[in-house]
Image (tube, rainbow, N blue to C red):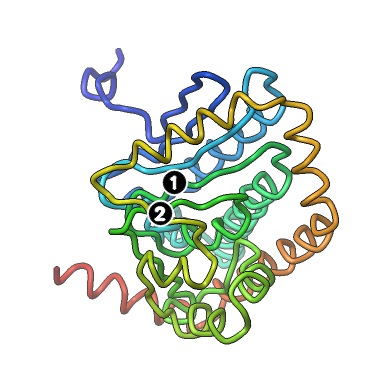
Amino acid sequence: MPNPAMADQEPELIVTVKDKVCILRFNRPHIKNCFSREMMTEISLALEEAASDPDILILVMTGTGDYFTSGMQLQDTRAGQSSMTSMDTETDVEQKLSNAIHSIRNTFHRFVLSLIDFPKPLIAVVNGHAVGIGVTMLGLCDIVYASDKATFQTPFVKLGLAPEGCSTYTFPQIMGPGKAAEMIFFGKKVDAAQACQSRLVTDVFPDTCPDQVWSQIYEWAQLPPSTLTSAKGMLKTTKKDILCKVNTMECDHLVERIQDGEFFAAMMKFFSQKSKL
């Protein structure tokens, strides 16, 4: 029989379509809208479906609550370990770890590729704090609006992880090598105004008054569809091959990092600190 509690539970990704605008709303506010592998796959599918839907002209990503997204659910990186049993042989252990690691790699690769390949205007309305992939994915959006309460941080090195989301290419292109290094190497946290000054964010809106942003998006959705998608195609085509290569390179490095001792040490420290909160 179905679980009544599950029946009342809201979906983790809310997809709505109205007046040619598709909104993907990350809906895990109780855990800062972090992405599980399942949720990343769901977002990829939604992007792929919206790409071919003639009733959708603009796609917008946003979040519920105080976070846009806090990035990848780090517990997923330990999935291979959690599936081990005392009956496993050394070969079983190695295989389970390998399967889990490559599942993470493939999920990331598809997620980023779905952003690179999206043929229509792609807008992020960053409603709150963004961390990790929640920041790097912004470099693949056409327009980024951010609440004045939003912050942006990419703590890859601190967590023993590799940069992703094509940030090793897009960040230096967008904000210059120095600002990119501050974020990617050292995980510098910036607010919405600083992110806008660095061109990662297009414009900042008052958190108490987002209506102007949304009304502008719905107005743009009335533009001639073929002309609009053609304009995006001309703007993005020259960089698409580069982005695809960078995505593959970053995902391969992510696999290397996850198998490295520095990553395991960082994860032990991270989960130890969380348990004390």
Name the residue at 85% across, 57% down.
238
Q: Kindly tell me whether residue 94 is visible in this rendering.
A: yes
3D distance between C-alphas at marks 1 and 2: 6 Å
| Picture quadrant where residue 62 is located | top left
Residue 53, position as x, y percentages in the image: 67, 21
Farthest residue toward the left? 277
Tell me which residue sits at (61%, 48%) in the image.
111
Image quarter hosting the N terminus: top left
Q: Observer-nearest residue: 105 or 150?
A: 150
**The one of 131 and 206 positioned closer to us in this rendering:** 206
Residue 36 drawn above or below residue 197: above
Residue where numbered disc 2 is placed: 146
Left or right side of 61 for 273: left
> Mark 1 belongs to which amino acid?
Val
Q: Is residue 110 left or right of residue 257?
A: right
Q: Is residue 78 left or right of residue 268?
A: right
Is residue 87 visible in the rendered structure shown here? no
Q: Residue at x 59, y 27 (%)?
A: 221
**Counting residues from the N terminus, which is met first, the one under dot 1 or under dot 2?**
1
